Image: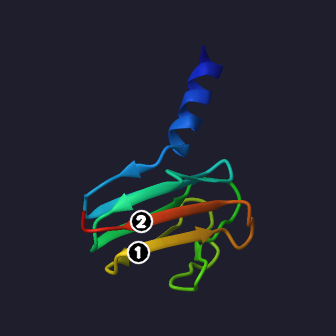
Amino acid sequence: MKKVIQVLSLLCLMVPISTWAQEVEVDIKAFMYGPRELKIAPGTKVTWVNDDQVPHTVAETHKVFRSGALDTNERFSYVFDTPGVYEYFCALHPQMIGKITVSAN
C-alpha cells in the first residue's frame, strides 16, 4: 500500500495544474519540479522550494529569470507579470524541466 501511495504522489507531480492564486509554490524533490507545469494569471508570484538533499537551480531557457544554487529548504521567487510560456530547467541537472504558462484566461 505504501508503494501505491508513493507512485500516486509522483503521478500527481507530473500533472499540469491550473491556478489563479496570487502565490504558488513549486516543490523541488526527487530531482523533479512539482508540479512540473503550471497555468497562472499575470501577477502571480511563484516560489520554488528545494526539498531535496542536493542543490538545485531554477533557470528560464531565455534567461528571463535564474536562481543561484538552492540548498535544502532554500527558496527562489519570481513574479510573472507578462503573459507567455516560460520553460525552465535546473542548470545542475538539465534533465529537470518545468513550464509555466501565464494567461489572463
76, 36: nearer the viewer: 36
Q: Residues within 10 Å of mark 2 (few under 14, many from 20)?
A: some
87, 70: nearer the viewer: 87
Q: Secondary structure at mark 2?
A: strand
Q: Residues within 10 Å of mark 1 (few under 14, many from 20)?
A: few
Residue 104 located left or right of residue 49: left
Toward the top, the furthest residue is: 1
Residue 15 located left or right of residue 88: left
Mark 2 residue type: Thr
> Where in the figure is residue 19, as x and y percent of width and height?
31, 54
Mark 1 residue type: Gly
Toward the front, the furthest residue is: 105
Q: Residue at x 38, y 59 (%)?
A: 39
Q: Residue at x 34, y 70 (%)?
A: 45
Residue receiving disc 1 = 84
Residue 101 tag number: 2
